Image (cartoon, coloured by chain):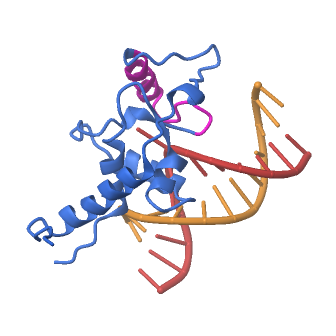
Chain colours: A blue, B red, C orange
DNA sequence: CAATTGACTTGAT
DNA sequence: TATCAAGCCAATT
């Protein structure tokens, strides 16, 4: 019991909430999870994703500059850009997308609730949610 | 438990 | 605008 949910799992839960046509940067994800300076950790979590985790729209996470930052895999970066373009996002000649236009701005209370719920669900699937 | 790594970010040059 | 260095975090070894 009490197996605390890994930071990575929370990252996946949040990334799953990003709607099509919208994106989030690593730092933002970390901030929404309560770790303002955990951008690198988020990137680490994304790199840990495997082809089987198709439920996680990893391609909707870009760097703060509005550019894809997959390293060691030019093909991966190309795929990410292709998937985003397929959702209507456009890139300029330098390979940047418009963050002002595509950055996802969720209602913080809602996101916090989802994270809180994720922690609870993954920690104790059977714990009865409440009652009041 | 210490060292290493990496899909990051920001500020300075 | 492009490059460099330092700061910060979690998972791995």
Q: Which residues are magenta?
A: A64-85
Viewer-proximal residue among A48 and B9: B9
The number of discs equals 0
Viewer-proximal residue among A19 and A10: A19
The percent coordinates of residue A87 (x first, y second) are: 38, 19
Residue drawn at x 58%, y 24% is A98
| Image-based side of A128 in relation to A122, left or right | left
The percent coordinates of residue A2 (x first, y second) are: 21, 77
Viewer-proximal residue among B3 and A104: A104
Residue drawn at x 46%, y 49% is A29
Residue drawn at x 39%, y 32% is A59
The percent coordinates of residue A75 (x first, y second) are: 42, 24
Q: Quadrant of the C terminus of chain A?
A: bottom left
Residue drawn at x 19%, y 62% is A121
| Image-based side of A108 in relation to A38, left or right | left
* Residue B6 in the image: above or below residue B3: above
> Quick one: which residue is furthest to the front in this view?
A132
Q: Quadrant of the N terminus of chain A?
A: bottom left
The percent coordinates of residue A38 (x first, y second) are: 52, 58
**A93 magenta-colored:** no
* Residue A41 in the image: above or below residue A51: below
Q: Quadrant of residue A118?
A: bottom left
Viewer-proximal residue among A35 and A70: A35
* Residue A8 in the image: above or below residue A93: below
Q: Quadrant of residue C1?
A: top right
* Residue B3 in the image: above or below residue A15: below
């Amino acid at each position: 019991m009490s197996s605390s949910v890994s930071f990575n799992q929370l990252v996946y839960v949040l990334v799953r909430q990003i709607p099509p046509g919208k994106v989030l940067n690593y730092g933002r994800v970390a901030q929404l999870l309560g770790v303002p300076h955990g951008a690198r950790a988020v990137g680490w979590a994304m790199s840990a994703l495997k082809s089987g985790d198709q439920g996680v729209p990893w391609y909707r996470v870009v760097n703060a500059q509005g550019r894809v930052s997959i390293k060691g895999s030019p093909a991966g970066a190309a795929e990410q850009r292709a998937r985003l373009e397929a959702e209507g996002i456009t890139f300029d000649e330098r390979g940047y997308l418009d963050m002002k236009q595509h950055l996802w701005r969720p209602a913080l209370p809602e996101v916090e609730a989802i994270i809180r719920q994720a922690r609870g669900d993954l920690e104790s699937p059977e714990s009865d949610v409440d009652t009041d």
